[in-house]
Image (cartoon, rainbow, N blue to C red):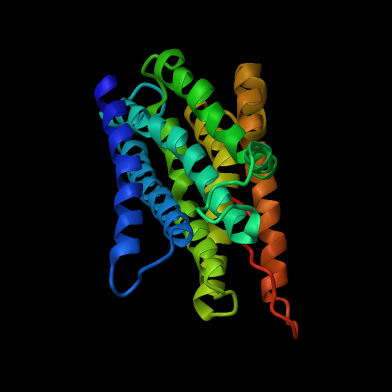
């Protein structure tokens, strides 16, 4: 178990540092640290999402029997991804920190003027990103132990499908980068926004009804009969995982409506969400 986790603990922070240094040193770019940190964090999130969704596709398509079939990637990637969620909490804080400095709240060397200012940045970060930090903490402290211990090798198909929820993350990250560089009105931003909306709906919101339907087909039950046939704690867990996805999807829809609504002034972005 330790080998995949150690590998993840090296790969994700290492990729972040490599990307940040490269963006700062390339003669064509020479980005400031704040820009390099933000873009590097988005890049690492996109890479992790591509890896997770690829692993999920391999696992879910390989498991013909949705309960008993196993695939080594389901356990290996779950362990590999644990350090990412820990790293990403810190990476999001760095992005928030640098945004705070850009707004003029730091000293000449980029550090906060006082300890009280530091705690203000931390509180502001936790207030703004509370749902995302909570999501990451639950993934590490709850979902990881459950997937490794509680499942006891059962249901790799469902875990693979859950990993494919990351399909939407690269579109979210690209949208935030385009916003960072004032590209909200470009065709690329609009196309990316539409793809983000579609992928989020299919891979994060409709994922849960699909999992219920897949189990119902396996057990010979209708979709409506599945919630009554499975343990209550499974329904509760699915509801808790679905709730933030619905909230983020609402934010994406609200932003998309503003983006595609004809207006004389520049429209806001649809990317007012997170992973």
> Can residue 206 be seen at all in this image of the molecule?
no
Residue at 62% over, 46% down = 113
| Horizontal and vertical percent position of residue 5 | 31, 27
Instruction: Please state if 234 lies on the left or on the right of 158 as rendered.
Output: right
Q: Is residue 67 above or below residue 223?
A: above
Instruction: Please state if 42 lies on the left or on the right of 205 as rendered.
Output: left
Quarter of the view holding residue 244: top right
Q: Choose between 129 and 4: the one closer to the eye.
A: 129
Q: Choose between 162 and 2: the one closer to the eye.
A: 2
Quarter of the view holding residue 264: bottom right
Residue at 69% over, 46% down = 247
| Horizontal and vertical percent position of residue 127 | 70, 40
> Can residue 188 be seen at all in this image of the molecule?
yes
| Horizontal and vertical percent position of residue 205 | 60, 46
Q: Is residue 261 above or below residue 88?
A: below
Instruction: Please state if 96 lies on the left or on the right of 29 as rendered.
Output: right
Q: Which quarter shows the N terminus?
A: top left
Q: How many numbered marks does the figure carry?
A: 0
Q: Choose between 196 and 24: the one closer to the eye.
A: 24
Instruction: Please state if 211 lies on the left or on the right of 222 as rendered.
Output: left
């Amino acid at each position: 178990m330790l080998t995949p986790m150690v590998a993840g603990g090296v790969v994700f922070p290492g990729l972040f540092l490599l990307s940040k240094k490269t963006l700062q040193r390339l003669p064509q770019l020479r980005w400031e640290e704040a820009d390099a940190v933000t873009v590097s964090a988005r890049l690492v999130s996109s890479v992790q999402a591509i890896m997770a969704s690829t692993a999920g596709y391999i696992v879910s398509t390989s498991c013909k029997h949705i309960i008993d079939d196993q695939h080594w990637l389901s356990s290996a990637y779950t362990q590999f991804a644990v350090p990412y969620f820990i790293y990403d909490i810190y990476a999001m804080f760095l992005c928030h920190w640098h945004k705070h400095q850009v707004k003029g709240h730091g000293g000449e060397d980029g550090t906060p003027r006082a300890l009280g200012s530091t705690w203000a940045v931390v509180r502001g970060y936790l207030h703004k990103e509370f749902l995302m930090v909570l999501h990451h903490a639950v993934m590490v402290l709850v979902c990881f132990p459950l997937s490794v211990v509680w499942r006891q090798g059962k249901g790799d198909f469902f875990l693979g499908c859950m990993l494919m929820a990351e399909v939407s993350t690269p579109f979210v990250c690209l949208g935030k980068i385009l916003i960072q560089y004032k590209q909200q009105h470009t065709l690329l931003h609009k196309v990316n926004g539409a793809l983000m909306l579609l992928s989020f709906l299919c891979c994060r919101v409709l994922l849960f009804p699909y999992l219920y339907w897949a189990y119902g087909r396996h057990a010979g039950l209708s979709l409506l009969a599945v919630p009554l046939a499975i343990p209550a704690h499974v329904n509760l867990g699915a509801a808790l995982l679905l709730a933030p996805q619905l909230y983020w999807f609402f934010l994406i829809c609200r932003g998309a409506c503003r983006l595609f609504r004809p207006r004389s002034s520049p429209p806001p972005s649809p990317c007012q969400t997170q992973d």
